[in-house]
Image (tube, grey):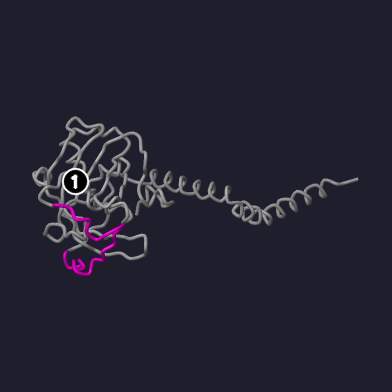
């Protein structure tokens, strides 16, 4: 007849054996292609969920004195397709649509009429490098106010002249350091850095700061999340 001590020892052994087998079971699941994709996507969704809950709308990314700026010539050019998609800068407009009271075509002069914000911040690339640079333009929040955007909407979606595309949650779009950037180091954006207009988001990983903007939409539904995100990268990716 089994004693109470025997039962307790059996349960302890069972737990130990289960813990030993858990990594093997997980490895077995990962070896199944369908399960591997499901686990991977679940991990990304959890990461985005956690990041969105940790994100503080008024918490600023660190800023730096001019003495710590790297030179513009040494700022690495990292592009999705080409360094210059051949935009006619004189005819360029930003197409605005979606949940806004004033849709239409906006020129760079419309953005320049808004307050100019300049910030020395660290650009962080997913490839492992970072750089302290100067970026300037108008706050996305000021532009959204100009176009009468519904800021209770969930997303800001952008498209670019080189075929790139990106989206932001509205909380990030309204962050005081999130810019529609048209200057670097006090000069108009160079073509390889996204002229005439790019996103600049010092609270986010570099690939969120899309270059060569041509269209912006305020929406509650995303057909596409972002070029790299649709390849399996994190969507929220706060620093």
Residue 21 figure quarter: bottom right
Q: Is residue 1 left or right of residue 114?
A: right
Looking at the rendering, which quadrant does residue 72 occupy? bottom left
What's the residue at 32%, 45% (across, down)?
Answer: 56
Task: Specify the segment rendered in magenta.
Answer: 66-88
Q: Toward the viewer: 187 or 9?
A: 187
List x then y, in percent, for residue 91. 11, 47
Horizontal placement of 2 versus 23: left or right?
Answer: right
Q: Secondary structure at mark 1?
A: strand
Please state the horizontal and vertical placement of residue 216, each as a whole percent of the image: 24, 41
- Where is residue 68? Give x, y as percent: 21, 67
Q: Residue furthest right?
A: 1
Which residue lies most toward the top here? 101
- Assess disc 1: are there few (<14), some (14-19) or many (≥20) residues with their C-alpha within 10 Å of its C-alpha: many
The overriding secondary structure of the stretch rendered in magenta is loop
| Quadrant in which the N terminus is drawn | top right
Q: How many marks?
A: 1
* Residue under pointer 1: 139
Q: Is residue 114 magenta?
A: no
- Which part of the image, by quadrant, shows the C terminus? bottom left
């Amino acid at each position: 007849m089994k004693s109470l001590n025997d039962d307790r020892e059996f349960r302890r052994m069972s737990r130990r054996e289960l813990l030993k087998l858990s990594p093997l079971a997980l490895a077995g699941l990962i070896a199944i292609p369908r399960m591997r994709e499901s686990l991977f996507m679940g991990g990304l969704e959890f990461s985005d969920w956690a990041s969105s809950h940790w994100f503080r709308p008024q918490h600023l990314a660190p800023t730096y004195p001019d003495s710590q700026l790297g030179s513009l010539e040494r700022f690495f050019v990292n592009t999705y397709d080409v360094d210059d998609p051949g935009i006619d800068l004189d005819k360029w407009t930003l197409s605005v649509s979606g949940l806004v009271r004033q849709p239409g075509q906006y020129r760079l002069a419309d953005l320049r009429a808004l307050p100019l914000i300049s910030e020395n911040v660290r650009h962080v690339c997913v490839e492992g490098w970072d750089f302290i640079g100067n970026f300037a333009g108008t706050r996305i929040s000021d532009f959204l106010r100009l176009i009468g955007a519904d800021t209770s909407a969930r997303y800001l979606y952008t498209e670019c002249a080189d075929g790139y595309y990106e989206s932001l949650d509205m909380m990030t779009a309204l962050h005081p350091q999130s810019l529609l950037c048209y200057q670097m180091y006090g000069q108009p954006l160079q073509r390889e850095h996204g002229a005439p207009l790019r996103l600049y988001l010092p609270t986010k990983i570099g690939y969120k700061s899309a270059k060569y903007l041509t269209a912006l939409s305020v929406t509650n539904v995303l057909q596409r999340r972002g070029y790299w995100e649709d390849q399996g990268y994190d969507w929220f990716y706060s620093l």
